[in-house]
């Protein structure tokens, strides 16, 4: 990609104030229809940043071989879960897509081959949080998948190539959970804010300290950080969206935490704002 390509990125959008980046701990799909302190935190985050021209979401729930980006005009609302009330399946989030932004995103990631996808849509990692931030569904949303064949350092480095989008009013959101072990949920405390197993408490403290100290290498090398992180991240799908968010941080930017609570023993809702 040459300089002219970079200057023409997101041709539909002019240069704007540099957009912040968010990592949102999305938790249970029920957060889409419940009223609690976490969805209040999502709404508050939206009031504290400029209204974006478009949103690029990297969700834990689109874990693919290779990298894909949604490129349809109207992405469908995907109900990728089971066993929940009908009211949750009835939710639709009819935000438009942005095929031009999808194309430009793919170009920015070159030489990585990126497939423009016309089948996926918006999974609950995206719509369950974005609907609280922008309930009118009037902002275009695209998703970028996570290549499950690649290690965390690869994703951290790949994210840096997306930074140009921030200068065009694009809000980049990583959506997952830092501590996420569904097999070890404490069902007696599934809705108890602050409830965490000892290992979850330790993992949260470690990762929070690394985040606030800017020690991202320990976060990237999570598999080397002891038992608590092994329990907290049994699979990387919900963790890698955080890695993308951190890869977009410039040294001069502030990092703050919000929604920073454990719930259900083995889940953290900790969310991150950069910029």
Image (cartoon, helix red, strand yellow):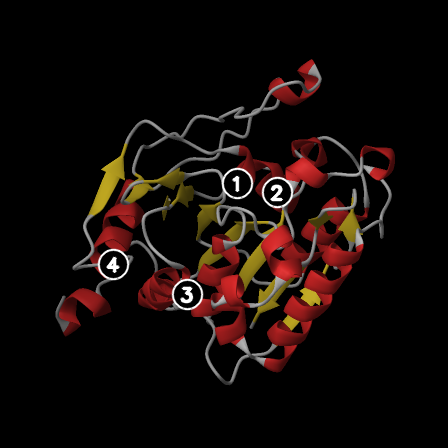
Residue matched to label 1: 126
- Dot label at residue 224: none
Q: CA distance from mark 2 to mark 1?
A: 6 Å
Numbered mark located on residue 129 in the image? 2
Secondary structure of the residue carrying tag 4 is loop
User: Which sits earlier in the primary sequence, circle 1 or circle 3?
Assistant: 1
The residue depicted at 47 percent of the width and 54 percent of the height is 240
Q: Residue at x 70, y 31 (%)?
A: 30
The alpha-carbon separation of the residues under discs 3 and 4 comes to 15 Å
Secondary structure under the numbered disc 1 in the rendered image: helix
Q: Quadrant of the N terminus?
A: bottom left
Tell me which label, 3 or 4, sits earlier in the chain: 4
Q: Position of residue 186 (x, y in %)?
A: 80, 38
Q: Is residue 138 left or right of residue 150?
A: right
Earlier along the polypeptide chain: callout 4 or callout 2? 4
Q: Are marks 2 and 1 in contact (CB under 8 Å)?
A: yes
Q: Quick one: label 1, few (<14), some, or many (20+) residues within 10 Å?
A: many
User: In terms of sequence position, does the residue under pointer 4 or pointer 1 come before the other?
Assistant: 4
Q: Are marks 1 and 3 in contact (CB under 8 Å)?
A: no
Residue 43 x %, y %: 70, 50
Which residue is painted at 34% across and 58% down in the image? 13
Mark 3: which secondary structure? helix
Closer to the chain start, of discs 2 and 3, is 2
Residue labelled with disc 3: 166
According to the image, label 4 marks what residue? 109
């Amino acid at each position: 990609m040459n300089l002219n390509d970079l200057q023409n990125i997101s041709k539909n959008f002019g240069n704007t104030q540099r957009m912040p980046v968010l990592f949102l701990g999305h938790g249970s799909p029920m957060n889409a229809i419940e009223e609690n302190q976490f969805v209040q935190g999502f709404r508050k985050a939206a009031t504290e940043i400029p209204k974006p021209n478009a949103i690029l979401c990297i969700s834990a729930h689109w874990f693919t071989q290779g990298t894909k980006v949604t490129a349809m005009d109207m992405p469908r609302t995907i109900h990728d879960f089971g066993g929940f009330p009908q009211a949750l399946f009835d939710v639709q989030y009819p935000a438009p897509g942005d095929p031009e932004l999808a194309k430009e995103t793919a170009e920015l990631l070159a030489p990585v081959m990126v497939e423009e996808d016309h089948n996926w849509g918006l999974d609950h990692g995206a719509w369950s949080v974005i609907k609280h931030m922008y309930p009118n569904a009037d902002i275009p949303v695209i998703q970028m998948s996570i290549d499950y064949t690649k290690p965390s350092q690869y994703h951290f480095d790949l994210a840096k190539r997306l930074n140009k989008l921030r200068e065009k009013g694009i809000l980049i959101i990583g959506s997952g959970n830092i501590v996420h072990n569904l097999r070890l949920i404490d069902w007696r405390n599934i809705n108890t804010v602050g409830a965490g197993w000892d290992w979850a408490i330790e993992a949260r403290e470690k990762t929070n300290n690394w985040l606030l100290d800017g020690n991202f290498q320990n976060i990237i090398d999570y598999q080397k950080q002891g038992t608590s992180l092994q329990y907290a991240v049994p699979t990387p799908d919900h963790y890698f969206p955080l890695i993308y968010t951190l890869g977009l941080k410039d040294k001069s930017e502030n990092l703050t935490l919000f929604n920073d609570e454990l719930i259900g023993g083995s889940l953290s809702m900790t969310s991150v704002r950069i910029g």
